[in-house]
Amino acid sequence: MSGSDTDALTRLDAAELARRVQAREVSSVEVTRAHLERIEAVERTGLNAFLHVAADQALAAAAAVDDEIAAGTVRSPLAGVPVAIKDNMTTRDMPTTCASRILDGWRPPYDATVVRRLRDAGLVPLGKTNLDEFAMGGSNENSAYGAVRNPWDRTRVPGGSSGGSAAATAVGEAPLALGSDTGGSIRQPGAFTGTVGMKPTYGTVSRYGLVAFSSSLDQIGPLGRTVLDAAMLHEVVGGHDPCDQTSIDAPLPPVVEAALAGARGDLAGVRVGVVTELSGEGYQPGVLAAFTDAVRVLTELGAEVVEVSCPSFTYAMPAYYLIAPSEASSNLARFDAMRYGLRVGDDGSRSTDEVMSATREAGFGPEVKRRIMIGTHALSAGSYDALYGKAQKVRTLIVRDFTAAFERCDVLVSPTVPTTAFPIGDRVDDPVSMYLADLCTIPANLAGIAGLSVPCGLAPEDGMPVGLQVMTPALADDRAYRVGAAYETARDAASGVPFASTVPDPAALETAS
Ligand code: GLN
């Protein structure tokens, strides 16, 4: 295949790729090969979005789908389309590292439910994407395997922790990717890379096989270049799973139908609430400008826009940074040098405790250690009531704020992040400034509701993408897709070019230089 064929196929969205493969205009093998070539060209420039590429398995899976389609069987609307998987979801034929040294060499014996569902639906896993170690971070700089670069500006972060999945999707290494979102890790890198990212309602996408960070907040979700693509992937992985005790036994909201309806229709009768506490002072001017413009578009589409106040959101960040590390300190106790991956100092002269401690010392990076220490402290007898218990009370207040707001509005909107993607290295020495990148996304995780990030233009001061966040009540994820798709259609109609086609191409830059 020539370079231009590769480029053409890797620029198409997943819905169109699926249509062509299923109509046998192009084979899944050709589509998969094009993406593997794209990965090779882009990774050569140092993007570092992938930790593992499974070329042979991908081509074999694609060939099997082609055979089925030739025999008249189409497993799902996305059959034949490649997908990238964040490396904190287990895969039986690929390593799972969580971007941590402690899982060096670990081969999971089973597929996460979402991975099994991808395979069952005939999607083609390309490989595993880079992340902040154990999904702890907002910039991807906490990976033990090096930072990911932002394709829009290689000196900047792609966001985190699903930075590899977001960068790969933005730049056409994969048309679709899975991420996980504990405090914003799908939506925030979505905003930083100009991709669409969705954190579904808690309990609606199985966490079985997602390596646990903070179990009451973690949620797997889709990334794509269009709202419809994200909805299509959401539909494949979502729905009840008996293997996950927190899985909700209810039908998945009609997310694809909503995305299609949104793209065709207006927003007449939709009540949109702008959250007072999630904009204003401290926000980057270009982010506020892009957000204000997006709200104007929603109004033009017929939405009724009101301002709503959620006063407890002010305490969401400190509450999150107690609850998430507390759960992490307990979840990460399983990495004990005995069961998984790395083992340091096991030379026969040391006790189990000494090997465990040497392994954890060598295997965990600084941010993971910081969180284990904060969490252990917050849960200790002398601090529990003042720290962990207080944070749980704040969590209840946040749920109440959302409940009150959703009595007046169908969806709530805000910027996804207060700033655009920041330069690599800028915030690594200042955890608190790093934590601020999650200010707008954390409330949805604490309340278990859904949140979508849709690109809403570029900030004039740095030319970097800005995200519009659309939050919905639990189990009303479809509303976010409807509003997101309506906005996306109006946005592209106004500019005359699909936003997704404007991502700079690092491979082309490389050839040019
Ligand atoms: N950036 C946030 C954190 O560091 C959120 C991470 C996530 O959602 N996985 O915890």
Image: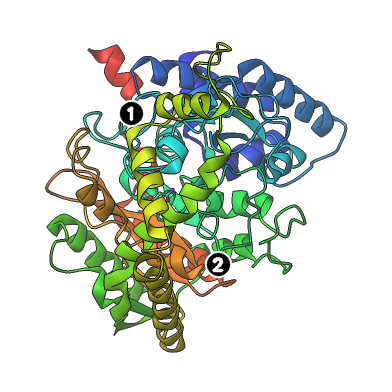
Image point (67%, 29%), residue name: 108
Quarter holding the C terminus?
top left
Name the residue type under label 1: Ala
Residue on which disc 2 sits: 477
Tell me residue 441's x, y (percent): 37, 60
Residue on which disc 1 sits: 147
Which colour scheme appears in the figure?
A: rainbow
Asked whether, in this view, residue 225 is left or right of residue 423, the answer is: right
Q: Give the answer, above or below, for where 414 lies relative to 185.
A: below
> In which quarter of the view is residue 506 placed?
top left
Q: Give the answer, above or below, for where 145 lies relative to 153.
A: above
Asked whether, in this view, residue 109 is left or right of residue 382, the answer is: right
Image point (56%, 13%), residue name: 1
Q: Give the answer, above or below, for where 196 lies relative to 338.
A: below
Q: Secondary structure at mark 1?
A: loop
Whole-angstrom CA distance, mark 1 to mark 2, is: 32 Å
